Image (cartoon, helix red, strand yellow):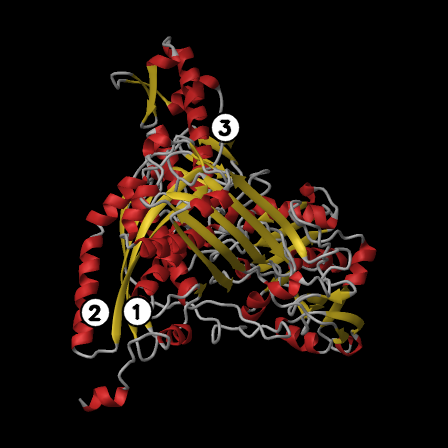
């Protein structure tokens, strides 16, 4: 196989995205959004908008309630917010949909939105966790506080272990609110067939079946009334995976009411205002060690700003379950609290609680290593779970299936040339001081662990025709990961047929009536296992059918190259001949494969960086990733996922932050002020891997889509801390580490930079 199966389509402009879907006559949905973080809606007046010949229809939240529409879907683990697709009574964040209009002309939408007059009565907003703790005002009138969720985990006696410990480290770390920023913003197109009483919905989502379920629940109609189709998707990163958004249901309502196809495409500003952001988690951490550097206790309190809550505001619970990382810690006392504020509803962004957990424990480990005057890798080596100790119950709610952490560390030291990086740093800093350069270098490492294969079940159907061609229908749904290629490879390998004979079909609820989708590094762990299971079942049926005509039992037969053979490879029967004997045109098998638990990916990363002491500008000079994603099905795709994940983490660690003023108004509403790394800021990523095949999955693979992001935060911050301490400054505790923050930290140091004028004159 020369390239990815999907490459030819996507690189020649033959892809099909939601905005490519056009009908001869169609209407355009527009959303009137709140300019206030917290306000009562006194009046909505459409009279000016109705004067336009482009105006078709309008809708308010009160009208939605009268129509019997249910609130936006929420996961049940948190308190119900009961927010509707359009605000009812009051609005609770800037950008919330308060009214909707339908226009005949795409270019008239913005004008019609401006023509809708909304009268508000401002209410005091809550914009921080500290304000939310006061419980006044309440964001949701039916709640008695501003807490969406609390959870905890305990093992042993952490307080007593900390009291008795030789070394104790404490700190507070955090990652600011960050957007997913897929290259394709959210979009939907809906066409209602009145004769069939059926909605055809095209969405840019990470699961067609999940969107179908949300629409069914919110519009109170059977799922079969919604034919959801997902074709090519220009990135998701979690933002299109779990959250229920208003525009999908609104487009359905308008299409049914008018008989017109309805299209909505988010602008980049709307995407930054409403599409679910992630992170915004903070943690007070306390770890304790004995005199030999063995961890004896971890105490932590996680706090999350979930905005106005959302489908997956429970991510703090996932952070808590992964806080012990890859370490043996006998005593744990972990708490997590999710607060609501007057910001848009949070959701998963690449990692969904995992990068936060890794950042918190790995920053603490590095600071502890400094306290012990111990090499950071050595401290980790003394505390990681050993291969013979798996499966390992981490005390916070997860049982790790298997890994080889010592080998990962060895690979980083040897192939990753960790010692050479330390030597380079020492030489660089010595030369910089000797030549009075305004530069300082640092080296950082981290270990990461990630649960993959979430929600444990996926569906697949495999169909073979008489010519031996195969179609795999999968509940997984690609949005840039090369999933069509990898799933085709798995079927090809199991059935020993050319990969060109396998076609992968996804994202159509008529063809795949149930499926979970793609998120949480689950596509190859769970979806791949379902594909292998279907291929195994198909092979079993082929051999069972062939045994009737060959006189040999199925265990004496093989299927390879499109033929039934005996064990010495002699062809006995072709697929076409067998199908003719059986008088069938095709053979079909279905599976709903269920994993017993998550399978855990792991890795160790190294970052070498340089800081300009005068400007605070940071440059990553070298980045090394050593990862264990289990069995690697396709090396290029795995490397691409790691590389992309690292760059996503670079953005979150150094550039990306959704900022707000004291009134809750967003300050980052375009790519002019919300910064993401370009090719210039993106380092080359040197990738090494080990393979510890998973015993949980049928294909031996673990997930890999989020590993690079998870590790990049602490690897970069540990290197930054190392560099800052070279000049007597304290490391930073909150991401992103902007040049302004680095510069502020440098001003606390003992090495004053030489002004530019002096350097120029000398």
Q: Where is mark 1, residue-wise?
A: 619
Q: Relative to residue 140, is residue 428 depicted above or below?
A: below
Q: Relative to residue 36, is residue 182 depicted above or below?
A: above
Residue 228 versus residue 198: which sits nearer the camera? 228
Residue at 56% x, 65% y: name it: 271
The reply to whether callout 2 and callout 1 are in contact (CB within 8 Å) is no
Label for residue 588? 3
2 or 1: mark nearer the eye: 2
Which image quarter is the C terminus in? bottom left
Label count reads: 3
Question: On the rendered structure, is 394 left or right of 689?
Answer: right
Label for residue 429? 2
Q: Relative to residue 492, is residue 142 depicted above or below?
A: below
Residue furthest to the right in view is 66
- Which numbered disc flags the more N-terminal residue, 1 or 3? 3
State the CA–CA distance, disc 2 to disc 3: 65 Å
């Amino acid at each position: 196989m020369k390239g990815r199966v999907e490459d030819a389509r996507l690189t020649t402009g033959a892809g099909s995205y939601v905005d490519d879907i056009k009908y001869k006559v169609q209407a355009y949905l527009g959303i009137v959004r709140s300019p206030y973080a917290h306000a009562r809606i006194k009046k909505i007046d459409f009279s000016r908008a109705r004067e336009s010949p482009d105006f078709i229809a309008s809708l308010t939240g009160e009208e939605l309630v009268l129509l019997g529409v249910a609130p936006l879907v929420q996961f049940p683990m948190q308190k119900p917010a009961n927010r509707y697709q359009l605000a009812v009574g009051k609005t609770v964040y800037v950008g919330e949909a308060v009214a909707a209009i339908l226009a005949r002309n795409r270019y008239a939408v913005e004008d019609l939105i401006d023509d809708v007059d909304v009268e508000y009565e401002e209410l005091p907003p809550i914009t921080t966790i500290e304000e939310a703790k006061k419980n006044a005002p309440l964001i949701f009138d039916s709640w008695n506080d501003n807490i969406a969720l609390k959870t905890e985990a305990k093992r042993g006696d952490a307080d007593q272990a900390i009291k008795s410990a030789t070394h104790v480290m404490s700190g507070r770390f955090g990652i600011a609110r960050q957007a997913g920023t897929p290259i394709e913003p959210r979009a939907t197109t809906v066409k209602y067939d009145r004769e069939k009483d059926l909605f055809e919905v095209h969405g840019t989502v990470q699961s067609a079946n999940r969107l179908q379920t949300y629409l069914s629940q919110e519009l109170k109609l059977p799922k079969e009334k919604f034919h959801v189709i997902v074709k090519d998707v220009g990135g998701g990163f979690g933002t299109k995976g779990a959250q229920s958004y208003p525009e999908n249901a609104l487009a359905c309502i308008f299409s049914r009411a008018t008989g017109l196809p309805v299209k909505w495409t988010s602008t980049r500003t709307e995407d930054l205002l409403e599409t679910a952001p992630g992170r915004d988690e903070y943690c007070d951490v306390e770890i304790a060690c004995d005199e030999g550097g063995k961890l004896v206790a971890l105490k932590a309190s996680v706090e999350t700003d979930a905005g106005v809550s959302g489908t997956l505001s429970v991510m703090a619970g996932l952070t808590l379950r992964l806080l012990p990382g890859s370490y043996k810690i006998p005593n744990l006392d972990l708490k997590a609290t999710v607060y609501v504020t007057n910001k848009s509803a949070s959701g998963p962004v690449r990692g969904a609680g995992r990068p936060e957990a890794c950042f918190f424990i790995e920053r603490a480990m590095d600071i502890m290593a400094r306290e012990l005057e111990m090499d950071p890798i050595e401290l980790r080596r003394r505390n990681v779970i050993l291969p013979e100790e798996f499966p390992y119950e981490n005390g916070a709610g997860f049982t790790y299936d298997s890994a080889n952490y010592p080998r990962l560390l060895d690979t980083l030291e040897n192939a990753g040339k960790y010692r050479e990086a330390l030597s380079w740093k020492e030489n660089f800093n010595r030369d910089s001081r000797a030549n009075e350069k305004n530069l300082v270098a640092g080296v950082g490492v981290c270990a990461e662990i990630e649960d993959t294969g979430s929600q444990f079940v996926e569906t697949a159907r495999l169909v073979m025709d008489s010519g031996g061609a195969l179609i795999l229908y999968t509940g997984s749904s690609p949005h840039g990961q090369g999933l069509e290629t990898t799933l085709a490879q798995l079927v090809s390998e199991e059935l020993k047929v050319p990969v060109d004979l396998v076609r992968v079909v996804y994202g159509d609820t008529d063809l795949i009536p149930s499926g979970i989708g793609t998120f949480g590094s689950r596509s190859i762990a769970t979806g791949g296992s379902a594909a292998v299971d279907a291929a195994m079942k198909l092979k079993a049926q082929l051999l069972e059918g062939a045994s009737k005509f060959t006189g040999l039992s199925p265990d004496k037969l093989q299927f390879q190259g499109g033929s039934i053979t005996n064990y010495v490879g002699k062809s006995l029967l072709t697929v076409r001949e067998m199908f003719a004997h059986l008088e069938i045109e095709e053979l079909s098998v279905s599976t709903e494969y269920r994993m017993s638990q998550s399978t855990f990916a792991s890795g160790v990363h190294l970052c070498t960086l340089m800081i300009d002491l005068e400007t605070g500008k940071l440059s990553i000079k070298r980045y090394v990733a050593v990862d264990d994603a289990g069995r690697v099905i396709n090396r290029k795709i795995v490397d691409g996922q790691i590389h992309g994940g690292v760059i996503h983490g670079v953005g979150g660690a150094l550039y990306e932050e959704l900022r707000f003023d004291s009134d809750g108004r967003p300050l980052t509403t375009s790519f002019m002020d919300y910064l993401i790394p370009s090719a210039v800021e993106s380092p080359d990523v040197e990738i090494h891997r080990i393979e510890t095949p998973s015993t949980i999955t049928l294909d031996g693979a673990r997930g890999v889509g989020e590993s690079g992001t998870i590790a990049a935060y602490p690897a970069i911050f540990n290197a930054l801390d190392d560099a800052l301490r070279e000049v007597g400054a304290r490391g930073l505790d909150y991401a992103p580490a902007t040049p302004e923050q680095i510069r502020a930290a440098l001003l606390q140091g003992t090495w004053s930079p030489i002004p530019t004028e002096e350097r120029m004159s000398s």
